[in-house]
Image (cartoon, helix red, strand yellow):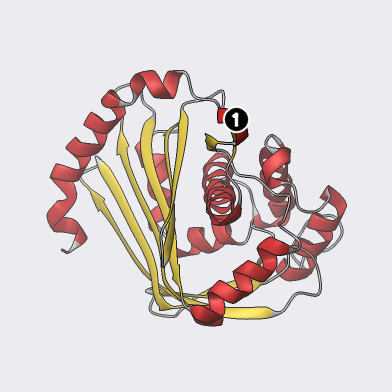
Amino acid sequence: MPLALAQAPLAQELRQRHADLSQALARSAFGRPLLLQSQHGRDTDEGVVEAVLDAPLDRVQALASPQRWCDVLMLHQTTHRCRVAPDGRQLDVQLSNKSGLGGQLLSLRLNYEASVFKGELLTVRLEAAQGPLGSREYRIRLEATALPSGQSFMRFRYSYGFGLLARLAMQGYLSTRAQEKIGFSLEPGPGGSLQPVRGMRGVIERNTLRYFLAIEVLLHTLELPPAQVERRLLAWFDATEQYAKQLHEIDRAEYLALKRRQLGLNPKGSVQ
């Protein structure tokens, strides 16, 4: 269904969803009104963040720009490059299979569609039928509506499917570098105790929250001139370090060196 045809009912649905989740948001384990869920299926993984943003919807609507999505994606340590196609309907992204320097670069072309409805709703879709290493059905979806408080309620979904090659690559990652990494949700462990999820659910939860934090940081730094982009990088790194047990990959200096190289920044954080 075209985005515009579903806007009014979706805005109402999101507001009702916010009302239904009000108690859960208030007692969130994240210490803020944010909930994270994940699903690991036979062929698809999905992470969902539902959260109250401390920003009015007219500010959140900056995400109707494809270039702003490149700004979001470039904060992630494994995004090497992002370019908006001349028609504004696609993003050409290069991803690295490592968090630091020296990883293999993989290409991903995302189709882009966004819609704003009467100052009540923003919807964004980024999708790719095929991804690197035999992955498929990459989907990033954002839906946000205005709240009476002047804040916004947002639902963010991140999902992808995988074939045999992608599955084997992920199994290798999970059995080596990610062997000890955990997610945020809890599941029953030995003796009935609760323990953080691991494996593919841990992967999808970590990346979903990283992308959400990148969105939030961008909204708080919209007015930064290009010459001060390093302030945004530092803000995102610091935001992820609040959840270092799950999200820490590289240290601050290595992250800044990586991003300076990718973005063409000089050591003072300005564009060369």
In this rendered view, identify the residue nearer to me: 236 or 208. Answer: 208
Question: Quarter of the image containing the N terminus?
Answer: bottom left
In this rendered view, identify the residue nearer to me: 113 or 229. Answer: 113
Q: Residue 160's x, y, as percent?
A: 44, 65
Question: Quarter of the image containing the C terminus?
Answer: bottom right
Q: Residue 123's x, y, as percent?
A: 30, 52
Mark 1 Cα within 10 Å, few/some/many (few <14, many 20+)? few
Q: List the residue tagged with mark 1.
A: 191
Q: Is residue 193 something that shows in the picture?
A: no
Q: Is 52 placed above or below 249 here?
A: above
In this rendered view, identify the residue nearer to me: 271 or 133. Answer: 133
Instruction: Specify the quadrant of the image occupied by residue 60.
Output: top left
Instruction: Specify the quadrant of the image occupied by residue 148.
Output: top left
Say what amino acid the circle numbered 1 marks: Gly
User: In the displayed structure, does residue 128 sit left or right of residue 262?
Assistant: left
Assign a secondary structure to mark 1.
helix
Residue at 74%, 47% in the rendered image = 248
Residue at 18%, 49% in the rendered image = 7
Instruction: Specify the quadrant of the image occupied by residue 125.
Output: bottom left
